[in-house]
């Protein structure tokens, strides 16, 4: 059974699982959708599997044989025969993973939560994940198969539109905040952060979107009433919103996550070792894998990079 599949056939299945549609898979693999459909059908027939859509994501039943086949194809990617696959969070992708390094291809960059990227890593559909919520990952005992390379830490602060009644106030208290709704973190996505946010006792405005879009997040602040939880990355993407003068309720960190057995491979190390603490000082993209250089000048206080 092993190595019976061509690289393109298994890639067709993986890209449909990863990119969600045959159209996106065809675009990534530079072929037409009918080719993707034919390769996908052959792959499912060989492994006697059927795809199911769960929470708007395609899935296949667990298959040890398929996982073994994927390990072989992953090794081929590590040797440079095909692009390695990088997933990222909605803001880490556009801000820190653009342009991609040579030999890598990017994903959807719209996952809300940590569960789906972890699943794709464990099934070896993707090779690495640039995560901006490392504190919401399972504890080490719950992820012994995954390696985590810390990249930065920053506070999670409350932001609002410049016209918000609290935008120009100083020395705000929790009581001041409770007069206004706060966009909630979806249940089941970032559980630790959501728990920390709920401790503030704010009036949480629920959101249930399975994938990120600006209209469902940042644009809620346009009503000049709703509060948003922001990190430094959010501020880079939405410089028009302002931080409120209130202590940060909690913090979070960014990390590159991969399978333990991939952590020492040069292509994966190249994504984080040259400079694990690179952070964009200006609102323009910077690659986390660019060469580490010592520069003069102060680093933003909200960012506490962690260099190995």
Image: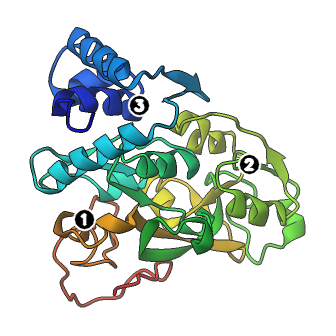
Q: Which of marks 3 and 2 is nearer the N terminus?
A: 3
- Marks 3 & 2, CB-CB < 8 Å contact: no
Give the position of the N terminus as an image quadrant.
top left
Q: Mark 2 points at which residue?
A: 184
Q: How many marks?
A: 3
Type of colouring: rainbow
Q: Name the residue under label 1.
A: 268
User: Residue sitting at 34 percent across and 72 percent down?
Assistant: 279
What distance separates the C-alpha of mark 1 from that of mark 2?
34 Å
Callout in the foreground (1, 2): 1
- Marks 1 & 2, CB-CB < 8 Å contact: no
- Marks 3 & 1, CB-CB < 8 Å contact: no
Crowdedness of circle 1 by 10 Å Cα count: few (<14), some, many (20+)?
many
Q: Earlier in the sequence, mark 1 or mark 2?
A: 2
Q: Residue 17 has which mark?
A: 3
Q: Which element carries disc 3, helix, strand or loop?
A: helix
Crowdedness of circle 3 by 10 Å Cα count: few (<14), some, many (20+)?
many
User: Residue sitting at 23 percent across and 47 percent down?
Assistant: 72
Q: Which element carries disc 1, helix, strand or loop?
A: helix
Answer left or right for 134 relative to 296.
Answer: right
């Amino acid at each position: 059974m092993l190595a019976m599949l061509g690289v393109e056939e298994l890639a067709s299945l993986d890209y449909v699982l990863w990119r969600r549609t045959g159209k996106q898979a065809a675009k990534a693999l530079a072929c037409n959708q009918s080719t993707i459909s034919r390769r996908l059908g052959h792959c499912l027939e060989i492994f006697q599997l059927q795809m199911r859509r769960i929470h708007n994501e395609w899935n296949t039943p667990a298959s040890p044989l398929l996982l073994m086949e994927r390990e072989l194809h992953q090794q081929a990617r590590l040797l440079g025969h095909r692009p390695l696959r990088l997933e990222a969070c909605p803001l880490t992708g556009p801000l820190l993973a653009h342009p991609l390094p040579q030999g890598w291809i990017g994903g959807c960059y719209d996952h809300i939560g940590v569960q789906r990227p972890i699943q794709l890593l464990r099934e070896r559909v993707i090779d690495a994940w640039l995560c901006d919520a490392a504190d919401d990952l399972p504890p080490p005992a719950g992820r012994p198969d995954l390696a985590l390379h810390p990249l930065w830490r920053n506070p999670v602060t409350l932001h609002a539109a410049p016209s918000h009644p609290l935008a120009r106030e100083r020395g705000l208290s929790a009581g001041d905040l409770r007069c206004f709704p706060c966009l909630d973190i979806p249940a089941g996505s970032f559980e630790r952060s959501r728990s920390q946010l709920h401790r503030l006792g704010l009036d949480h405005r629920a959101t249930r979107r399975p994938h990120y879009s600006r209209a469902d997040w940042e644009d809620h602040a346009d009503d000049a009433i709703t509060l948003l939880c922001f990190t430094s990355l959010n501020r880079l993407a939405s410089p028009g919103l302002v931080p409120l003068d209130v202590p940060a309720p909690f913090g979070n960190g960014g990390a590159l996550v991969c399978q333990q057995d991939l952590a020492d491979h040069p292509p994966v190390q190249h994504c984080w070792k040259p400079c694990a603490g690179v952070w964009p000082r200006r609102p323009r993209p910077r690659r986390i894998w660019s060469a580490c250089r010592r520069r003069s000048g102060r680093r933003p206080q909200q960012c506490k990079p962690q260099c190995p």
